[in-house]
Image: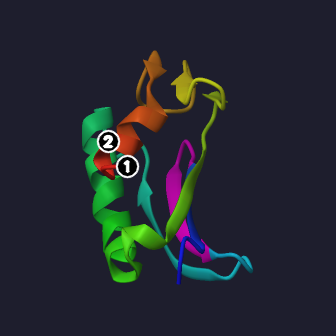
Amino acid sequence: MTKSLAIGIDIGGTNTTFGLVNRDGEILFKGGISTPAYEHIADYIAALMEGIMPYIESVGIENIEGVGVGAPKGNYFTGEIAFAPNLPWKGVIPRAKLISEAMNL
């Protein structure tokens, strides 16, 4: 298995869902956390990684092709969430940077 898997993360105002999929779109693992349960973005990222990392470790990080993240007011070009009204964190959140650093990518 070489770089044949992807992680999907959907950050919503109520829940965050995540999963690991193969090239055929088959969901291998899925999970979720409550988005508003984390007042601080650092705590949210830690909880997200706690949910995702066991899946990554079970297949090996070397087999992950990429990570896709959907979020309200998410900016594809900057990797940021900017002033999302339905998320508990205000201002500009460097989403891609935080997740990348947490996964050691």
- Residue 43, by quadrant, is top left
**Whole-percent x and y of residue 22?**
63, 78
Number of labelled discs? 2
Q: Secondary structure at mark 1?
A: loop
Q: Residue furthest right?
A: 24
Left or right: 94 in relation to 43: right
101 or 29, which lies in front? 101
**Whole-percent x and y of residue 84?**
57, 25
Amino acid type at mark 2:
Glu
Q: Is residue 102 above or below residue 29?
A: above
Label number found at residue 105: 1
Left or right: 59 in relation to 18: left
The residue singled out by tag 2 in the image is 101
19 or 76, which lies in front? 76
**Whole-percent x and y of residue 31?**
46, 71
Left or right: 27 in relation to 14: right
Residue 12 part of the magenta-drawn span: yes
Provide the residue span drawn in magenta: 11-21
Label number found at residue 8: none
Q: Is residue 103 visible?
A: yes
Q: Residue at x 53, y 84 (%)?
A: 1
The label nearer to you, 2 versus 1, is 1
Amino acid type at mark 1:
Leu
Q: Residue furthest front?
A: 2
- Residue 45, by quadrant, is top left
Q: Are marks 2 and 1 in contact (CB under 8 Å)?
A: yes
